Image (cartoon, rainbow, N blue to C red):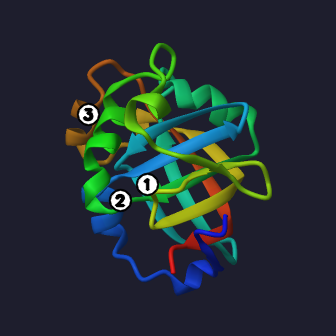
Amino acid sequence: MNRFRISSPYDLKINPFQAIGNDWILITAGTPDSFNTMTAAWAGLGVLWKKPVAWIYIRPQRFTYQFTEKYDDFTLCFFPEKFRDALSFCGTHSGRDTDKIAATGLEPIATDKNNIIFAQADIALECRKLFYQDVDNSNFLDPAIEKLYPLKDYHRLYIGEITGCFQKP
């Protein structure tokens, strides 16, 4: 953890549209003994219920889903461009049958709360789940959204309070 400085989420100097939508993030849930990570581009940061929060979306068939369901926390890690291939790998291979950590060389680090962040990340956010809800397609106001779900495998939305913010100095 000494590779990071602890800061406030209010001190983040990132463009979330670029950092999440274009650069991607890793969502990780579990403990140092058993965790999984996945690449995501559907997420957000903001303030809700008077708390700094992150929200993520995970499809039920993703291996990370069962970890996010089981544990109270999840983390989000933001990486420099040179780790794009590692993030691509983590988004196209399942942790059910692939050791993503061995394949990518990413170095997991346990936080004080026993959550996983990665040494190569520039920013890591530790989040405690506050809320979840399954996406209900009957609420889509734009019919084009339904085309993103040809298998009808709607995401589960998780909202988590950001309880830890770690940045590289």
Q: Position of residue 98 (x, y in %)?
A: 45, 19
User: Camera-side residue: 28 or 58?
Assistant: 28
Q: Earlier in the sequence, mark 3 or mark 2?
A: 2
Query: Contact (CB < 8 A) between labels 1 and 3?
Result: no
Q: Is residue 139 visible?
A: no
Q: Is residue 10 left or right of residue 31?
A: left
- Distance from the alpha carbon under mark 1 to that under mark 3: 16 Å
* Amino acid at dot 3: Leu
Q: How many numbered dots are placed on residues in this image?
A: 3
Q: Residue 43 bears which disc, if any?
A: 1
Residue occupied by mark 2: 20
* Amino acid at dot 1: Ala
Q: Is residue 39 visible?
A: yes
Q: Position of residue 166 (x, y in %)?
A: 60, 70
- Decide: is 13 above or below 65: below
Kindly indicate the quadrant of the structure image that contains residue 134.
top right
Residue at position x 46%, y 60% from top?
121
Q: Earlier in the sequence, mark 2 or mark 1?
A: 2
Q: Quadrant of the N terminus?
A: bottom right
Closer to viewer: mark 2 or mark 1: 2
